[in-house]
């Protein structure tokens, strides 16, 4: 039996399984939290009972972190160049050498209760792309639960924009469908199926000619996005076994976003940029594109979990027995940085958004379980992919805490005997020095961040520009509070079976003063 | 433009892996105090360090007669690293104060710690008045029928009465021959103080030990008999001593030399510590001392 036809292909959590499968899956859910907490507890316990060993470990870890930062910076720098190159390239002209007229872009815009100005900005952004709009099918995917106001907004959008696209469809995902959990996955799956029936089948469009772009409601593609995706789709060796990942910028409202939101958004962009140079570590994230036929074959996105954006990649990866990959586009789409009416609300929203993102750890048991069950995937591919994924979630939740908080533990907990050693005196100095040198790399981050900023609004002074540069000194704080802590939170929830539900990030726009 | 090639990335990875594998032991050895020396031949030697703490800013700390640092409000201690195992002469000095000297031995991989103390060459003595002239609102030491007694003086004066005639609050005795403080047990035996550590082995104060070897007892002996003693306010490593010829401060640390500094010299002085302050009595007058 093909893996995609097995009962566990679209498993959401251990409770969906029975017997030993449930036990194994449950253990795999515990694994990431166990590893992360185990590491932190180990450092604390070693600091008390074996402070010298703990100090050795911390020194080795400091060096590892430093080298990893430099290593990733090289990837970031290269991707920066590539992004600039791709932004400057004329993708339409490049498409001119290919036969591409048959390609249709199906753009899914899932919306919940966002304001009309958010949707308008996105739709206008799509209209401003240089791709033939008649080759774009826009689907505004509503949630029934969002109520009549959302429906009214959808009607307004449809009347305003429908005739400017090749196809325009508004879908309303019914609420409380058994077996579904509320979230983007169930909505866009419903929308994709509706689009299949009402657009593709109705107009006899071959599924293989359709590229689906699963956007967020605030995703504004850059001018040549669809040309760029089309070119890559047509030139990819196996386009139906490939997902296409853009780089998420958070420029829609970056000048209105508070400092913390800007840093966190920028950090997220940098992370994706680094991953773009490491495609074997890349899974789809947030807005991405993929062939319709690939989606159709596996029944679209999972409807019973939170991280549908990355899970769809793993679904396809397992369905194709490991012969499926993500092609990094190194071309941006722009989204909203997290902005709420008040500062503390913003902080709370950033935390919740990052917890949702880091809840992508729910993919780890799915992948490992799939590796146990799917014997068609080569063994060493399983080993290397498992290692990459486990290390990724482990380092996300533990590394910043170990670097910024635990580096001094042996000195605090090691006792008088340890504190008389040269090692005890030198440990904080060494940790501090490595940290300071590593932080110098933030200058590069500042420069890259500035280079992609949209034009400064007239109501913002030079100080705002300076703030954009200096904000990066807060990274040691944000990387712990909005990186490691929500990561650990997500893993702990998964570990104890307190499964997270989907949380829609509110899209709030501050009006320019 | 192509992504970073696999070959290049593998090259980076191998390079950083090699740096990590070589760097980690080197960093650990460096943190443990190992240093490369060139003395005709290249060799690795183990070093130790010194940690000298002070209580005040503006103090000059010398190691082997070389000024290492002047303390500031934010940094009142120094850590001197990369010292070859040997005996080092430490001096902490400030104008108008008795200097503090100590010969400290540095051992490989270990930081030798010492806590300095300095007292003024001329301490400030402020007399606690015996009476108040209520009408004029001034204090005085001479008696008159219309003056009222200063209750502070009265309270302090009780402290200075012989043990037999005063009421001693529990745990506040200042002339008892034995004292304990956070594990330190001090006995006055025939005018000499015997200090032993009664706390846990792991938390023994550094001045009991040199390298890994700790002694069980430290003796404080002075030129004349120690009549009474108490802990110096705010310090568990310093003692106030009443000798026949004055009041002194001595450190328990007996690593050479054991610093003993005079607060006041002369016959007939007595002292008491109350609420973190030092009071001295002589010829019926009580003074608040600032050292």
Image (cartoon, rainbow, N blue to C red):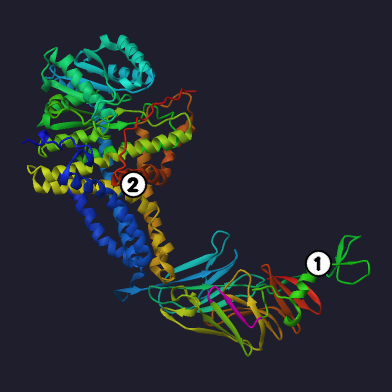
Q: Residue at x 29, y 55 (%)?
A: A64
| B10 falls in the magenta region | no
Q: CA distance from mark 1 to mark 2?
A: 62 Å
Q: Nearer the viewer, residue B116 or A108?
A: A108
Q: Chain of mark 2?
A: A
Give the labeled residue for mark 2: A488
| B179 falls in the magenta region | yes
Left or right for A137, reference B192: left
The residue carrying pointer 1 sits among few (fewer than 14), some (14 to 19) or many (20 or more) residues within 10 Å by Cα, namely few
Q: Which residues are magenta?
A: B176-183
Q: Nearer the viewer, residue A132 or A356?
A: A356
Where disc 2 sits, the SS reads helix
Give the labeled residue for mark 1: B151
Q: Residue at x 13, y 19 (%)?
A: A100
Q: Nearer the viewer, residue A179 or B37?
A: A179
Q: Nearer the viewer, residue A183 or A17?
A: A17
Q: Position of residue A199 (x, y in %)?
A: 17, 14
Where disc 1 sits, the SS reads helix
Q: Is residue A241 visible?
A: yes
Q: Which mark is residue A471?
A: none
Left or right for B35, reference A178: right
Left or right for A450, reference A13: right
């Amino acid at each position: 039996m093909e893996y995609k036809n097995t009962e566990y292909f679209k498993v959401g959590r251990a409770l969906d399984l029975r017997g030993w499968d449930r036990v194994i899956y449950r253990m795999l859910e515990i694994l990431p939290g166990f590893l992360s907490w185990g590491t932190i507890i180990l450092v604390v316990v070693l600091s008390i009972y074996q402070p010298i060993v703990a100090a050795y470990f911390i020194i080795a870890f400091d060096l590892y972190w430093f080298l990893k930062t430099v290593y990733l910076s090289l990837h970031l720098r290269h991707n920066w160049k590539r992004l600039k190159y791709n932004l400057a390239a004329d993708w339409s002209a490049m498409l001119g050498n290919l036969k591409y007229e048959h390609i249709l872009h199906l753009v899914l815009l899932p919306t919940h209760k966002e304001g009309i100005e958010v949707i308008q900005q996105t739709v206008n952004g799509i209209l401003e792309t240089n791709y033939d709009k008649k080759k774009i099918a826009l689907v505004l995917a509503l949630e029934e639960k969002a109520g009549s106001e959302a429906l009214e907004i959808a009607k307004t959008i449809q009347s305003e924009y429908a005739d400017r696209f090749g196809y325009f469809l508004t879908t309303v995902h019914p609420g409380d469908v058994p077996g579904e959990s509320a979230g983007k996955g169930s909505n866009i799956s419903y929308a994709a199926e509706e689009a299949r029936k009402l657009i593709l089948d109705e107009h006899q469009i071959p599924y293989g000619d359709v590229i689906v772009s699963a956007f967020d409601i605030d995703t504004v593609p850059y001018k040549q996005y669809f040309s760029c995706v089309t070119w890559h789709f047509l030139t990819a060796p196996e386009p139906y076994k490939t997902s296409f990942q853009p780089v998420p910028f958070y420029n829609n409202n970056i000048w209105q976003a508070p400092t913390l939101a800007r840093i966190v958004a920028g950090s997220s962009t940098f992370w994706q940029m680094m991953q773009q140079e490491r495609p074997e570590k890349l899974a789809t994230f947030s807005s991405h594109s993929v062939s319709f036929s690939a989606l159709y074959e596996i029944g679209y996105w999972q409807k019973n979990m939170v991280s549908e954006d990355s899970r769809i990649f793993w679904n396809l990866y397992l369905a194709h027995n490991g012969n499926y990959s993500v092609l990094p586009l190194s071309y941006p789409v722009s989204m909203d940085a997290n902005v709420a009416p008040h500062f503390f609300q913003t902080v709370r929203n950033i935390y919740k958004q990052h917890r949702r993102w880091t809840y992508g750890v729910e993919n780890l048991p799915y992948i490992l379980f799939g590796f146990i069950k799917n014997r068609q995937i080569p063994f060493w591919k399983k080993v290397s992919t498992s290692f990459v994924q486990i290390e990724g979630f482990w380092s996300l939740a533990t590394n910043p805490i170990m670097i910024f908080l635990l580096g001094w533990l042996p000195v605090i907990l090691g006792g008088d005997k340890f504190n008389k050693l040269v090692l005890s005196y030198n440990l904080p100095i060494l940790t501090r020095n490595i940290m300071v040198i590593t932080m110098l790399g933030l200058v590069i981050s500042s420069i890259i961040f500035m280079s992609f900023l949209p034009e400064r609004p007239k109501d913002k002074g030079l100080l705002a520009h300076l703030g954009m540069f200096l904000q990066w000194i807060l990274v040691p704080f944000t990387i712990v509070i909005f990186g490691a802590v929500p990561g650990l939170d997500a893993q702990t929830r998964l570990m104890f079976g307190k499964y997270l539900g989907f949380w829609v990030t509110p899209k709030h726009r501050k009006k320019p003063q | 433009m192509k992504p970073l090639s696999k070959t290049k990335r593998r090259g980076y990875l191998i390079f950083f892996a090699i740096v990590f594998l070589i760097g980690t032991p080197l960093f650990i050895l460096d943190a443990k105090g190992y240093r490369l020396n060139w003395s005709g031949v290249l060799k690795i030697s183990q070093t130790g360090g010194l940690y000298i703490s002070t209580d005040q800013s503006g103090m000059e700390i010398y190691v082997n007669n070389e000024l290492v640092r002047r303390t500031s409000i934010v940094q009142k201690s120094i850590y001197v690293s990369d010292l070859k195992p040997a005996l080092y002469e430490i001096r902490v000095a400030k104008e108008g104060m008795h200097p503090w000297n100590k010969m400290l031995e540095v051992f490989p991989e270990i930081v030798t710690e010492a806590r300095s103390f300095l007292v003024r060459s001329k301490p400030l003595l402020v007399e606690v008045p015996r009476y108040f002239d209520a009408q004029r609102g001034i204090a005085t030491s001479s008696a008159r029928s219309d003056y009222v007694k200063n209750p502070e003086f009265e309270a302090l004066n009780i402290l200075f009465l012989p043990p037999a005639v005063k009421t001693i609050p529990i745990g506040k005795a200042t002339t008892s021959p034995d004292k304990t403080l956070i594990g330190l047990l001090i006995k006055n035996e025939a005018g000499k103080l015997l200090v032993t550590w009664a706390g846990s082995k792991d938390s023994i104060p550094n001045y009991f030990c040199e390298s890994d070897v700790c002694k069980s007892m430290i003796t404080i002996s002075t030129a004349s008999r120690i009549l009474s003693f108490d802990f110096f306010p705010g310090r568990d490593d310093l003692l106030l001593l009443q000798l026949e010829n004055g009041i002194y401060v001595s450190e328990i640390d007996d690593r050479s030399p054991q610093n003993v500094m005079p607060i006041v010299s002369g016959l007939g002085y007595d002292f008491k510590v109350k609420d973190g302050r030092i009071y001295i009595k002589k010829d019926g007058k009580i003074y608040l001392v600032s050292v």
